[in-house]
Amino acid sequence: MPQARNRVVQIRDFGGPEHLQVVEAPMPMAAPGEVRVRVLASSLVYTDVVIRRHLYPQTVGLRPPFTLGYDVVGVIDQLGEGVTGFRIGDRVADMTVIGSNAAYRTLRAKDLTVVPAGVDAAEAATMILSWTTAYQLLHRLARVRRGQQVLVQGAAGAVGQALVTLGKMAGLEVWGTASGEQVPLVHELGATAIDYQREDFTQALPGGFDIVFDGVGEQGGRRALAALRRGGLLCAYGYTSAVQGHRRLPAILGMMARLHLSGWIRGKRVRLYSINLMRARRPTWFKGDLALLFHLLETGAVRPRVAERLAFGQVADAHRRLEAGGLQGKLVLCPDLPELPGGRATPETVAAQAGEALSPGWRPRRPCG
């Protein structure tokens, strides 16, 4: 049997996707209290773009080269000394921030959440960052109540879709902004769609919204504040507008401080959300919330959208697609996908791994373990 080898997606310098490279790496070994997993799925997320461009506060102290990869679903293939409660062959998940765009990696056993049997690994990976962020924004930060009227900025994005879906499940009246071509998706999710290219979302609801969830930060969040009623709550969790505008990190941090001050002056509340800070403060919340989301996935109560399952050679192109926007689902790296010389996994190789026969209208169901 050929010996297993490790491959990782490494950033060799801060900047554009051209600074990404797939390299051979030493096989990690599980230290005491750790497990090693063979990676089944690892999301490619917009936060990876922010990290790659040296704009993410939690990784600002890192210097290349290092491995990207914000989350991971994997199968345990090695147990470190002292690990209990897990066995080789268990499927587990974790949020790692970096290091999971890899074939193998080690994880602390105390941080792991079990992935239910039968759940698609790529779909499970979408739960870790995007859906947990949405769930915690709704139920931990905003503490929403049935009947509240809320606006989701960027409702067609990964977190936006989760906010709309989980918000509707919580009995909220949901509006969502999207570009014209993505309006049908927002309608399909059950929200009142606002085409931000043609409509002024600040005037969408007379009197203003109870809550605005904003991961865009347009005009420094001022327009999101304008859409709120007096006493309303702005939950800010991202700043894609500033990233796309090539703002530097000090300017972004200053923008957040001004947003707080502006909200106070206008009689509106502003809360900033970081999934990492929330997890550091309330680690049991994170594990419990993720386990709940896995249960919803297992029972079919939610169904996240996976735009494409990718092989290693497609990662740089995936980053370009993330920056271009317009995706209607999550891009997921599946290290087990075989590659052709161009780096792309063909339908035939995906089908072979999934154990499926090709047929007219065939779509891969489970190529990520």
Image: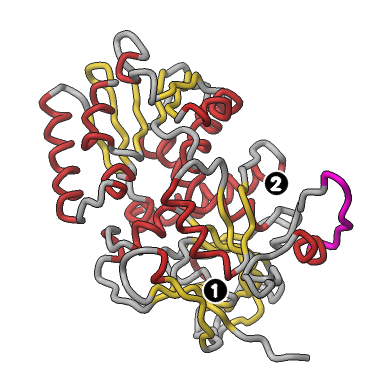
Visible residue check, residue 21: yes
Q: Which residue is mark 1?
A: 102
Visible residue check, residue 135: no
Circle 1 sits in a helix, a strand or a loop, which is it? loop
Q: Pick whichever of labels 2 and 1 is earlier in the sequence.
A: 1
360 is within the stretch colored magenta: yes
The residue carrying pointer 1 sits among few (fewer than 14), some (14 to 19) or many (20 or more) residues within 10 Å by Cα, namely many
The residue carrying pointer 2 sits among few (fewer than 14), some (14 to 19) or many (20 or more) residues within 10 Å by Cα, namely some
Q: Horizontal placement of 348 versus 68: left or right?
A: right
The C terminus lies in which quarter of the figure?
Answer: bottom right
The N terminus lies in which quarter of the figure?
Answer: bottom right
Specify the segment rendered in magenta.
354-361
User: Image height check: is 168 above or below 332?
Assistant: above
Q: Horizontal placement of 198 versus 119: left or right?
A: left
Q: Disc 2 residue type?
A: Glu
Q: Specify the label residue 298 is tagged with.
A: 2
- CA gap between label 2 and label 1 equals 25 Å
Name the one closer to the observer, 196 or 108.
196
User: Image height check: is 130 above or below 112?
Assistant: above
Circle 2 sits in a helix, a strand or a loop, which is it? helix
Residue 215 spot, x, y in % from top left: 35, 40
Residue 222 lies in quadrant: top left
Looking at the rendered image, the disc whose residue lies closer to the viewer, 2 or 1, is: 1
132 is within the stretch colored magenta: no
User: Image height check: is 33 above or below 366?
Assistant: below
